[in-house]
Image: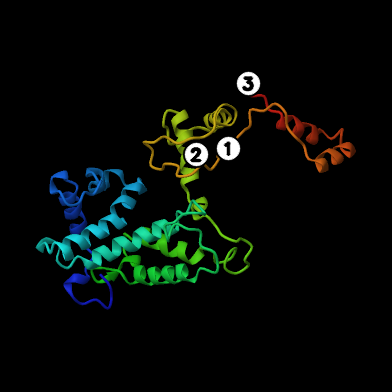
Amino acid sequence: MIDNFQRQWDVVSAFFVELAVKKLSQPSTGFLVIRKNKKNLQWVNEKMKVKLAVQTLSKSVAEALDFLNKDLAIADFKDSEATAYFCRTVNNLFDVFNSRNRMSKKPYEKPLPPATAQYFNFLEEAKDYLKSLKLGDSRVILSRRKLGFLGFIISINSLYEYRVKETKELKYLLTYKLSQDHLKIFFSCIRSKGGYSNNPTSKQFQNILKKLLLHTEISGNEASNVVALDSTSILHCSSSSEIKISEDMTSSSNSIEQDEDFIQFKNFLRISPW
């Protein structure tokens, strides 16, 4: 719960989320359906799958809680306002840190240019909100379950702090490019080529990396913990046999034509797919 909250309805409870998902995931309800399944509730068995948290702490769940509490006035969902607010805040934070499309129409999925003060105001409010959350008598950010909340706070502090907001070197930034998803997909491919071993030897890693470079463009498995959300290229190696060398490189090659390192570099640019 939050520092300045004294009443029962200010408590964020997973009970409301679980009950809402169970109640509204049945088509027989007739008025609203939440497309969630048991994995969203039994997330303990798949802690590394971020998408389960994203789907559960989402805008649709927040709206469902408000609908059940305010519109239908169901007693089981009385005092669920704080839980709905928590879900909506986390949902918006996920959107802010996963912007992928410059033309997105969703308010929090757009790139955040320096001139968009409203987004930074939201981030400041969200940061203060996360800092004030308490688990029992102690703050969540000081508890053993602090990592997710600290991750949000650190991300908020670092977002646009230098490159966009202060130096203005970038007009905007698609925040999904900063995520670890691409690195996780890469390591997922490394594991899949080595029989899903978490500890390949240096020789195995070298051979797997060569295969990924020369024979295939990296793409993650749909069953892995992370799924690619855009078309970012990882370790792309063109199959074209012709390599265009810039004029600067060509002119400099005349003076170091006999340089062994440069010759090896030119040969590297013409790697055979075989």
Spot the residue most to the top.
274
**What residue type is disc 2 on?**
Phe
Q: Nearer the viewer, residue 182 or 256?
A: 182
**What residue type is disc 3 on?**
Trp
What residue is disc 2 on?
A: 186
Task: Please report contact status of discs 1 and 2: CB closer than 8 Å, yes or no.
Answer: yes
Q: Is residue 68 above or below residue 226?
A: below
Left or right: where 102 falls relative to 17: right
**What residue type is disc 1 on?**
Leu
Instruction: Give the quadrant of residue 153.
Output: bottom left
What residue is disc 3 on?
A: 274
Q: Is there any visible trace of residue 262 in the rendered image?
A: yes
Q: Residues within 10 Å of mark 1 (few under 14, many from 20)?
A: some
Mark 3 and mark 1 lie on one chain; the one further toward the N terminus is 1
Residue 185, position in %: x, y? 47, 40
Left or right: where 262 falls relative to 158: right
Mark 1 and mark 2 lie on one chain; the one further toward the N terminus is 2
Spot the residue most to the right.
255
Q: Is there any visible trace of residue 14 in the rendered image?
A: no
Left or right: where 16 falls relative to 165: left
Q: Where's the N terminus, which quadrant?
A: bottom left
Residue 144, position in %: x, y? 31, 60
What residue is disc 1 on?
A: 235
Q: Secondary structure at mark 3?
A: loop
Give the residue displayed 20% in from the left and 51% down from the top. Answer: 32
Q: Where's the C terminus, which quadrant?
A: top right
Q: Residues within 10 Å of mark 2 (few under 14, many from 20)?
A: some
Q: Secondary structure at mark 1?
A: loop
Q: Residues within 10 Å of mark 3 (few under 14, many from 20)?
A: few
Q: Which mark is residue 7?
A: none
Task: Please report contact status of discs 3 and 2: CB closer than 8 Å, yes or no.
Answer: no
